[in-house]
Amino acid sequence: MLDVRDNLERVRERIARAAARAGRKPEDVLLIGVSKTVDVERIRAGLAAGLRALGENRVQEAKAKVAELGPPPGTSSATCRRTRSRTRWRSST
């Protein structure tokens, strides 16, 4: 099984290549990790590896995970908002 940090690095490399092809900067692309059916320890590993936005299908699940995890490392808070039929949770400073 791939390490979360290694997997995120591979995704970031793909984003960088795609951004270059599109004439964009990689930092203008928001990588959103999907936390549906993912245990808190794996989410914690993603946050430690620099992931700053997560998506969840159910508001209740997102709120429970935010309550357990607290704000991502290096941030002062986390916000949880509903967009269409999905819930997005993102760090805020």
Image (cartoon, helix red, strand yellow):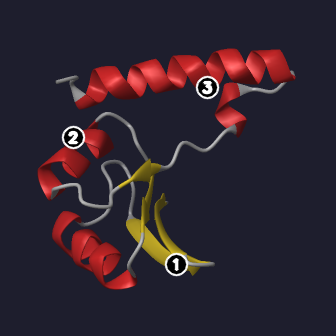
Earlier residue among tags 3 and 1: 3
> From mark 3 to mark 2, how far is it between C-alphas?
20 Å
> From mark 3 to mark 1, how far is it between C-alphas?
25 Å
Residue 57 occupies which quadrant of the picture? bottom left
Nearest the viewer among 19 and 2 is: 2
If the image is split into quadrants, where does the N terminus sit?
top left
Q: Residue at x 16, y 57 (%)?
A: 40
What amino acid is at disc 2?
Answer: Ala
> From mark 1 to mark 2, how far is it between C-alphas?
22 Å
Numbered circle sitting on residue 81: 1
Residue 85 occupies which quadrant of the picture? bottom right
Q: Residue at x 38, y 37 (%)?
A: 50
Q: Which residue is mark 2?
A: 45
Residue 72 location, x and y as percent?
33, 55
Earlier residue among tags 3 and 2: 3
Q: Residue at x 30, y 20 (%)?
A: 6
SS of the residue under disc 1:
strand
What amino acid is at disc 1?
Answer: Arg
Residue 16 location, x and y as percent?
64, 19
Q: Which residue is mark 3?
A: 15
Of labels 3 and 2, the one closer to you = 3
Q: Is residue 70 above or below residue 39?
A: below
